[in-house]
Amino acid sequence: GKVSTLRPENDADIIAWFRKVQQYNNYMVERKQARRDVKGALPQVLDNDKYYVQSRMVSLLSGQPGVRAL
């Protein structure tokens, strides 16, 4: 797999990132939330559930500024 790293600049960035990651702790995330958080296209709809996406299928780091692939 691909591993990436992110370096938040200040406490507010750390808290904001922590809150975002907490939302993706569940198995499913609302697609409208994922569209706001993910840079790029979302995966295709699975299991006839057009309102949710599996959290394991999206990358929060992809396309974010300051992210470095290891």
Image (cartoon, rainbow, N blue to C red):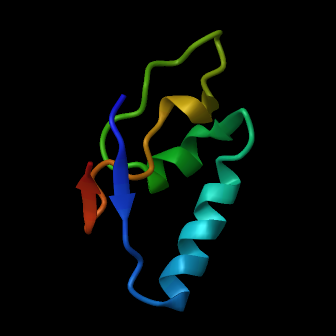
Residue 6 at x, y = what percent?
Answer: 37, 64
- Comparing 32 with 23, the one in front is 23
Outermost residue toward the right in this view: 26
Compared with 31, 13 (above or below) is below
Residue drawn at x 36%, y 42% is: 3
Q: How many marks?
A: 0
Q: Nearer the viewer, residue 6 or 45?
A: 6
The residue most toward the top is 47
Report the front residue among 69 and 22.
69
Left or right of residue 66, residue 6 in this image? right
Q: Quadrant of residue 48?
A: top right
Above or below for 38 versus 52: below
Q: Position of residue 5 (x, y in %)?
A: 36, 58
Image quarter where the N terminus lies is top left
Residue drawn at x 45%, y 90% as measured from the top left:
10
Q: Is residue 24 above or below residue 8?
A: above
Q: Is residue 32 above or below residue 53?
A: below
Nearest the eye: 25 or 5:
5
Tell me the residue at 33%/35% (across/down): 2
Picture coordinates of residue 14, whole percent (x, y): 54, 78
